[in-house]
Each structure stands twice: as structure tokens, then as C-alpha cells.
Amino acid sequence: MNLNHIHRHTAAFVCMLTLAAGFVDQAFAKKPTNVILILADDVGFEGLGCFGGRSYQTPRLDDLASQGMKAMHCYSMAVCHPTRVCLLTGKYPFRTKNPKWGSFPKDHESTTIASVLKDAGYRTAVSGKWQLSLLSKDLDQPHRMGFEQYCLFGWHEGPRYHSPMIFENGKQRDGLEKGYGPDEYRKFIEGFISQDDDRPFFVFYSMALCHDVTDDLDAPVPHGPDGRYLNYSEMIADMDKQVGQLMQFIQSSEHADNTLVIFTTDNGTPSRYIARAEGEKLIRLPIESNLNGEMRLGGKGKLTDAGTRAPTIFWMPEVVEAGTETDQLIDFTDWYATLLDVGNARLPRGYQIDGISCVDTILGDSSERTVAFAEHGKRYFLRDQRWKLYNNGDLYDVQAGPDESMPFGLKTDSRASSLARRRLSDQMRKMGLPQTIR
């Protein structure tokens, strides 16, 4: 694989970071900037009213968007695990050899964004979903990856919602038989922020919501008080409530004027959710939602917009202009570079990333990013705001047809599509990615 372009990009990024330091300092340096990165689980555009969703009520997130900036072109991976690897490493999954499901590359544990921010003087915490190991077998992994404190449910080990199995700072918590996981994850964050510590903080709020319950245990996890699991609409409502309560806490605290909040999601809405257990059988029901007046099934697991276009909000008083939106491209490797920028941190020596800081985007300016990338299995795409090229040669004008039902072929290319194909294909080659042109 040819990594020369990444070497060049990393050098360019460091140079850009140095040249832009004064500008970034002016925006973020009243005090060291705190960061809360909220990653909701399994929520596409249709999940939020402020992004055109009409099936669910999200008044608190809508309010957050009205006070900040909506990013209309942020792209995740199609499913949750590679998205998280991307976010924490700043690299596309193929760069780290596509770690197997539920794992994290050991040679990257000391260079996660949390590790780098910790080295730059931040106190760090993660709460909610982990999905990077079986925690009961490796309770130190979050610490090795730069998180000083953590409160995480046992992914594929026990419940995440009612009567949750929670590991906190190296131990399994007791007394949660009547507990509710999402309340515990949020309260942990509030407690962490409230600690008597003068260092700036980085919080990764990796929400359990709105993923359904785990489906691979010997016995189904407990139902809620209604004798069933939360439906998708209820999970959306609770996600909105939890974010709203956290924002209320922040806005009433001493940190309100120097905290950057980023809300985003790990992939699109699922097409089905686990509604209840009948004995040992799990009953799944479809999730069909209204987006801008059109009903659609969730697209999680697909590389279409329904699976990879992540609703994203930036909030920081007097830094992020209220009531704005941006069409600048963002992909999930960019969070690493962005937090480096905001935290005045440095890349570890010799460490190379795919991400490009989107601080300029947050401040209302244009971005250096010209294409976004996502992969799932053996398929991947490069895209800009209009054109999207897959590695099999299929090219789509996603402004004209976001459902991707009408690909351009080599024999049907227009002048515009031919130019777009050449440009995106050249970018793929520079990334060392093979293509099959049909």
C-alpha cells in the first residue's frame, strides 16, 4: 500500500497547525478549551427533527442545533466498531488492518486521541459504550488508551439499559439491579466534570442510545418496567433527554463559556430493532422513519447516505455562530485532528493520520478536506458533496439521486461525471486503494 500521500499530508497538517495556531488560539484560548464529544449510537438524519426527521421529537437537540452549527456532510463508517476505531486513531480502518469486531489494535493504544490529550495536560474520561474488548477480561484497556476514568457497560457481557452490567474504573459496579444504564453514564460524566481538578477535560460520551439490546447472550437481558424493551422512538426520546440534561448541567456550570460540545452519531438508523423476548426468542420489528416527508427503512450497514451520513452539531458560545449550518466535508478521522487543534496538542512522533482538522469549519470558514471516505467489508467509496465513486466503478450524483438508484457507467458518463470519476479515481490511487472499473 502506498502511504506516501499520508506522509505528505501529515507534514502538511503539522505545518498548517503551526501557521494557524494564532488564529485557533484567538478562538479557543480564553481558557484551555474543554471538549465533550457525544457519539450517539445508530441514529441517522431521520432521527433528529433539526435534520429533517419527522417521526420523532428531539426538542433539546433541536435547541442545541439552534444555538450552534449543523454539519450537513459528516460521514461515518457504515457500522459502529470501525467508526470508533477511526475516531480514536485518526486513521481509516484499512490503515490499521481492519481490526476484528470488538477489538482495538494494541500498537495504537498509546496514541489514541485521549492519550495525546492526556499528554497535553487534559484529564480524560469515557462513559457508555466501549466495544473494543470484553471489559471483564481486560479492565485496564481504557486506561492504557488514555482514559483516566471510565464508566462502561459490558459489551456483549450483560445489559446496557435495565439492570445494567457496568464496569467503572477497573471494577464491576454492584447495586444496579434497579438501575438504568443511560442515567448512570450521564451522571458519571457530570461527576467527573465536577471533580476538583484545574486541568481542562476531554469527555467521550459514547452513548448506549439508540442501539437495541444485545442479542448474543445465553438468556435475553431483562425487559424494562413495561415488560418489553424500549422501542426506537422511546430510545430517541431518551437520547434527546440525556443530552439535554447534560447540556443543562454544562450551561449552569463554570465551564459554560469554554466547553466545545460536538454531537454526532456512529452510523445510520437500523432497519430493525429487538422489541421483546418471548422465552429465548428475540422478536425484531422494522424501523421506518420519515425524513423530509419520505418514509424509509434505516440504512445501518449500507454505504449509502442512510448508513453513513451522520447528523452533527457543534456548540460553543461566542465561538460557534448560533443558527448556522455548513456544507463542508467532514469524515470520522477528522475528530482526531480537530481535537489536537483545539487542545493545542501535538501528533506523537512518527504517527500519521488521515484526518484533517475541521476547526476552520467550526469557525465558519472553508475546510481543507475535498473528499470523504468510508468502507464496509470489501466495498468503499470516496465522495464530495455531489459525486460519489465506489471501488467497483459505480459513480453517483448523490445530489440528484441520494438513493443511489442510477449509477453512471463509463458508457453513460457525461462531461461532468467523467471529470468527477477521474478526480475521485485518482484520489483512490493515491491512497493505494485498488479499483475494479466496469
Image: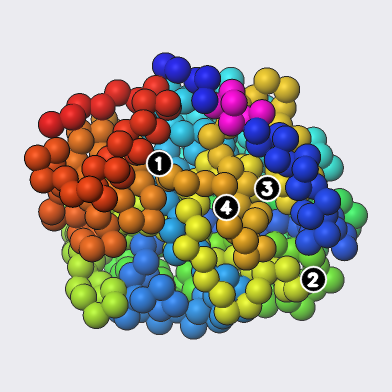
* Secondary structure predominantly adopted by residues drawn in magenta: helix
Q: Nearer the viewer, mark 1 or mark 3?
A: 1
Instruction: Give whichever of discs 4 and 2 has the lower sequence position.
Output: 2
Residue 42 visible? The answer is no
**Identity of the residue drawn at 9% across and 40% down:** 411
Residue of label 1: 373
The image quadrant that residue 24 belongs to is bottom right
**Identity of the residue drawn at 68% across and 47% down:** 339
Q: Which mark is residue 257?
A: 2
Instruction: Give whichever of discs 1 and 4 has the lower sequence position.
Output: 4
* Residue 96 against residue 309 in the figure, above or below: above
Residue of label 3: 339
Q: Give the range drawn in magenta.
A: 6-11
Give, as a three-letter code, the residue at label 2.
Asp
Return the residue nearer the eye: 66 or 397. Answer: 397
Return the residue nearer the eye: 84 or 152. Answer: 84
For label 3, the SS is helix
Instruction: Give whichever of discs 1 and 2 has the lower sequence position.
Output: 2
Q: Separation of disc 1 and disc 2 at Cα?
A: 34 Å
Left or right, 307 with reference to 95: left
Q: Where residue 376 sits in the image (x, y, percent)?
A: 31, 37
Residue 59 visible? The answer is yes
Give, as a three-letter code, the residue at label 1.
Phe
Left or right, 157 with reference to 140: left
Q: Separation of disc 1 and disc 3 at Cα?
A: 20 Å
Q: Nearer the viewer, mark 1 or mark 4?
A: 4
Left or right, 115 with reference to 245: right
Q: Quadrant of the N terminus?
A: top left
